[in-house]
Amino acid sequence: MNEDRRLESQGPRDETPSVGEPPQRASPARQRTLRHMRKLLANTAAAGAALHMAGCDRNWPPVVCDPLPPPFDSNSPVVCDPLPPPFDSNSPVVCDPLPPPMDCNDLTRESLDWWIGKSARWVDADGQPAIRVDLTSEAPGLTFAGPPVLEGAALSQADVETTSLTFACRPTAGTTSVEVAVPVRCEDVGGTIHLALDVSGTSTVGATVPITVGP
């Protein structure tokens, strides 16, 4: 209790003059201190009142507010990433076919049909119908070795390259099929592949001629 009285006696004195006493002016330093304290108290009270009455206002510069997430609604639909379809071992699997092996000692129709590119069509040769045949070899080690030998048609032109052969022929009147023997080399071994041209159709310029290849 004595301590409280001592603290009260040391506290700030009331500057309000007693009745009948002349007013006493505070020192300049004390006046500045009081003004500063009043300003701080006023700013603190204003900020507290604004926050209490208006809540957090994002438009008020001194205060930075993080937006609150929207409330959870159990009735709202939930969007989920779709799961991949389950693997079905019974579904068909599509694979790129592998080419048949190329064996120079055992040329087959299947391997030649895969490795030898071929096309034939009717053309005009000096006003007469003729057939142009184009062959290409993509088989490893298989090259063309000379002009073809024909049965059922007359050879009119041949252009022989290592991996390509182009020739033209005029079918014999009344024939429906032309047999062609093409000399080749496969891994330095001589051989022959055979073509069959179906010339039973129309001889209109540009029309396709069916062609097959075999050993």
Image (cartoon, rainbow, N blue to C red):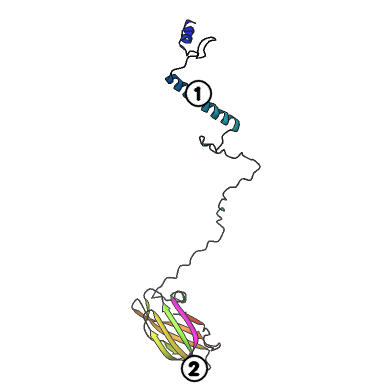
Residue neighbourhood size for the residue with mark 2, other residues' Cα within 10 Å, grouped as few (<14), some (14–19), many (≥20):
few
> To which residue does mark 2 refer?
128
Any magenta on residue 122? yes
Residues drawn in magenta: 116-129
For label 2, the SS is: strand
Please state the horizontal and vertical placement of residue 31, each as a whole percent of the image: 46, 20
**What secondary structure prevails in the magenta region?**
strand
**Splitting the image into 4 quarters, where does residue 142 fall?**
bottom left
Q: Where does residue 167 sit, x and y in percent of width and height?
A: 43, 86
Q: Amino acid at mark 2?
A: Gln
Where's residue 192, x and y in %?
A: 40, 82
Magenta span contains residue 14: no
Assign a secondary structure to mark 1. helix
Q: Amino acid at mark 1?
A: Arg
Front-lying residue, 55 or 11: 11
Residue 52, image x and y in percent? Answer: 58, 29
What residue is pinned by disc 1?
38
| In-front residue for pair 36/96 | 36
Question: From mark 1 to mark 2, how far is it between C-alphas?
Answer: 119 Å
Q: Is residue 162 left or right of residue 87?
A: left
Residue 151 shows in the view: no
